[in-house]
Image (spheres, rainbow, N blue to C red):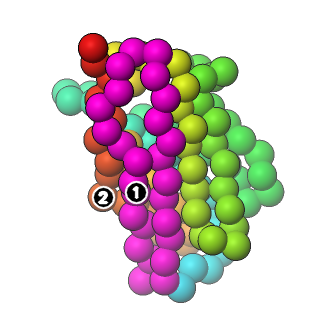
Amino acid sequence: QVQLVESGGGLVQPGGSLRLSCAASGTIFSIQGMGWYRQAPGKQRELVASITSGGRMNYADSVKGRFTISRDSAKKALYLQMNSLKPEDTAVYYCHLATTVDNWGQGTQVTVSS
């Protein structure tokens, strides 16, 4: 069974930065990719950034140039560096691991507010 645990969320002022981390544990086979999603109140969950098993990265247009996804395969960890944060980035951020099934973390709250 795969477990994903996110950390690093919090309250930050507009223009600030946060770094989210996702630690994976358990027996993991056939990794197709990993990514970060977010869900704001009253909105659908949306893809923020993803990285395939081959290392190809993809970003939502709204975060391009501000967010950077990275991974440490040896540590089974995924990261999201978020810079120049905006109030509209406020959401619960979820770590996602795609194997033969979808695996999700419990989410971490990011609030951007002055």
Task: Give the position of the N terminus as an image quadrant.
Answer: bottom left
Counting from the top left corner in percent of width and height, residue 6 is at 40, 57
Residue at the image position 39 percent from the left and 64 percent from the top: 5
Residue type beneath disc 1 = Glu
Residue at the image position 70 percent from the left and 53 percent from the top: 52
Residue 62 in magenta stretch: no
Counting from the top left corner in percent of width and height, residue 44 is at 31, 33
Q: Which residue is mark 2?
A: 106
User: Can residue 49 be seen at all in this image of the molecule?
Assistant: no
Image quadrant in which you'd find residue 74: bottom right
Counting from the top left corner in percent of width and height, residue 112 is at 33, 23
Q: Which residue is mark 1?
A: 6
Segment colored magenta: 1-26
Secondary structure of the residue carrying numbered label 2:
loop
Residue 6 in magenta stretch: yes
Residue type beneath disc 2 = Gln
Indicate whether 41 appears above or below 30.
Answer: above
Indicate whether 51 appears above or below 16.
Answer: below
Q: Residue furthest left?
A: 42
Residue at the image position 49 percent from the left and 77 percent from the top: 25
